Image (spheres, grey):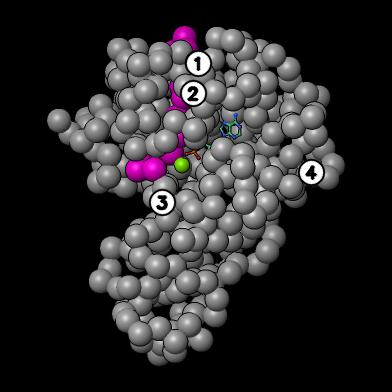
Amino acid sequence: MAARITRSPAEAASVLKRGGLVAIPTETVYGLAANAFDEKAVARIFEAKGRPSYDPLIVHIADAAALDQLVRTVYPEARLLAEKFWPGPLTLVLPRKENVPGLVTAGLDTVGIRVPDHPLTRTLLAMLDFPLAAPSANPFGYVSPTSPAHVAEQLGERIDAILDGGVTRVGLESTIIGFPEGRATLYRYGGLESECIEALIGPLNYAAATASDPSAPGMLKKHYSPSKKVLIGDPAALAAQVDAPFAILSFRSRYKETGALEVFTLSARGDLQEAAQRLFMGLRTLDALPVKYILAEWLPDKGLGRAINDRLRRASAR
Ligand code: AMP
Ligand code: MG
């Protein structure tokens, strides 16, 4: 049966209390949520997404006060980050308490946690006496959903409800910070600029985010991938080289006269925030066209441009 689409947090809450799966809006992307303490419900998330059990889920809580219920240690930097950036697109990976099911954390001794910043989901979390485990609401490995329609198209038959909160504002998944040996370390670039984090707590360790063969879960080299081949570089030069129909994903130029079937411009005014918000929409739009290639260009290597480039790199990985 197709998922019920609702704008009522109360209706979403009643589905979740019965052990159901609800796609929830956040400021980053749509999440596929279940009661984090209900192992059966959490198992259904992995099943619906086709997600391998070694990839841990992020736990969503109503506010920072709920942290102590789930983790053993909150490092001073983590406390500062939570105070400053929650609710917001920042996930903190911290040593977990026993009550967090191993299925949620893929058997790790740590758990990823954040407070999402979307009014409907905040209302929903306030109605529940349990946190929500929620990865992005897309089939494993594919581009994350930034609208309820994206969720309905791909997972509509496998989940119970979609809480419709419109198109997501940030459009990229959360930035993830962990504390291996107590050192603040960037695990994934995302919707909160690393510069903002460093301005608060000083230089981060980048080892995990830049490893060529990352071993940390979720640092998968190939991810966020459309089904078409993504090539990154100068789109005009790439256009001259390819032998089959193609589309272009550009930062700000229109790339006229390249012969592209379509050009999706992320931000004509060169605004990184707008580009981030439109990135996954752009990849999905171009992926649906009768083309063999998507030619994309690098964005400036700063702020949200870093997170966008990270997603492009992984979308292009074989
Ligand atoms: P998604 O919500 O689909 O973006 O996926 C959640 C991601 O959060 C995972 O793929 C990991 O990258 C990350 N994550 C969650 N929990 C942990 C953890 N305990 N340790 C390291 N990374 C984590
Ligand atoms: Mg995901």
In the drawing, does residue 190 fall left or right of residue 283?
A: right
Disc nearer the start of the sequence (4/1): 1
Which one is in front in this view, the residue at disc 4 or the one at disc 2?
2
Disc nearer the start of the sequence (3/2): 2
Q: Which residue is mark 2?
A: 104
Amino acid type, label 2? Val
Residue closest to the far left: 1
Task: Give me the C-alpha separation between circle 4 and circle 3.
Answer: 27 Å
Q: Which residue is mark 4?
A: 204
Q: What label sits on residue 101 in the rendered view?
A: 1
Residue 305 sits above or below residue 69 on the image: below
Task: Give me the C-alpha separation between circle 3 and circle 1.
Answer: 27 Å
Amino acid type, label 1? Pro
Amino acid type, label 3? Val
Residue 273 seen by the camera: no
Amino acid type, label 4? Leu
Label 2 crowd (10 A; few <14 / some 14-19 / many >=20):
many
Judging depth in this view, the residue of 16 and 11 nearest the camera is 16
Q: Which residues are magenta?
A: 126-140
Circle 3: element type: loop
Q: Which residue is mark 3?
A: 143
Task: Give me the C-alpha separation between circle 2 and circle 1.
Answer: 6 Å
Disc nearer the start of the sequence (3/1): 1
Q: Position of residue 7 (x, y in %)?
A: 31, 30
Residue 202 sits above or below residue 276 on the image: above
